[in-house]
Amino acid sequence: MQEQHLYEYAVVRVVPKVEREEFVNVGILVFCKKEKFLKAICKLDESRLIAFAPELDMAQVRQNLSALEKISNGDNDGGPIAMLETAERFRWLTAVRSSVIQTSRPHPGLSKDLNQTINRLFDEMVANGVVA
């Protein structure tokens, strides 16, 4: 029987006007301390975001989401934060901030297959075009 792993996930959001608290879900972060697993999947639907916030600098949003993925993967070109331990990177990525790229508060779950879980969460919360 395959062991279940306790994991945490957060939804990555683009918040064009922080004061309005409206956002579009663009990605998922999944972290499992026991497995030293941290992965991000982000996908930017630019046409949707332009319709939602035409003044948004898409090049900057793409660059910020790329940096988020590099940090989560621990890539060498992800800067000093990407060199931190897995748990520290997840906590840094999910820290509360007032910026265009934000994450939800972390939520817990159990998973037998973390890669399958991140794909399922992405499909449920991002690919289906959730806007709040």
Image: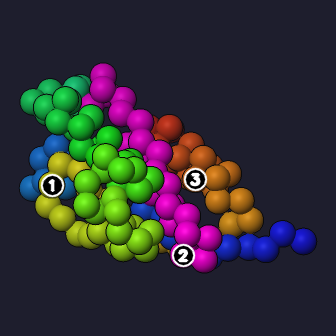
Mark 3 highlights which residue? 118
Circle 2 SS class? loop
> For residue 32: magenta?
yes
Three-letter amino acid code of the residue under disc 2? Lys
Q: Is residue 29 above or below residue 130?
A: below
* Residue displayed at 35% across by 55% down: 71
1 or 3: tag closer to the N-terminus: 1
Task: Pinpoint residue 99: horizontal percent, then vertical percent.
Answer: 15, 55
Residue 33, numbered label = 2
- In three-dimensional space, the C-alpha distance between marks 1 and 3, rounded to whole angstroms, equals 24 Å
**In the image shown, does 127 or 42 lie closer to the viewer?**
42
| Residue in the picture at 23% in, 26% down | 51
The residue tagged 1 is: 99
Picture layout, residue 34 above or below residue 63:
below
* Residue sitting at the far top: 47
Marks 1/2: CA distance? 27 Å
Task: Locate residue 78 relative to residue 129 in the image: left or right.
Answer: left
- Secondary structure state at the residue bearing disc 1: loop
**Residue 132 in view here:** no
Q: How many marks?
A: 3
- Give the magenta-colored segment's residue range: 22-49
Looking at this view, name the residue that lies furthest to the front: 76
Secondary element at image label 3: helix
> Could you tell me the amino acid type at mark 1?
Ser
Q: Could you tell which of marks 2 and 3 lies nearer the N-terminus?
A: 2
Image quarter in which the N terminus is found: bottom right
- Residue count near mark 1 (Cα–Cα under 10 Å), binned few <14, some 14–19, many ≥20: few
Query: Which one is nearer the viewer's eye here, 127 or 32?
Result: 32
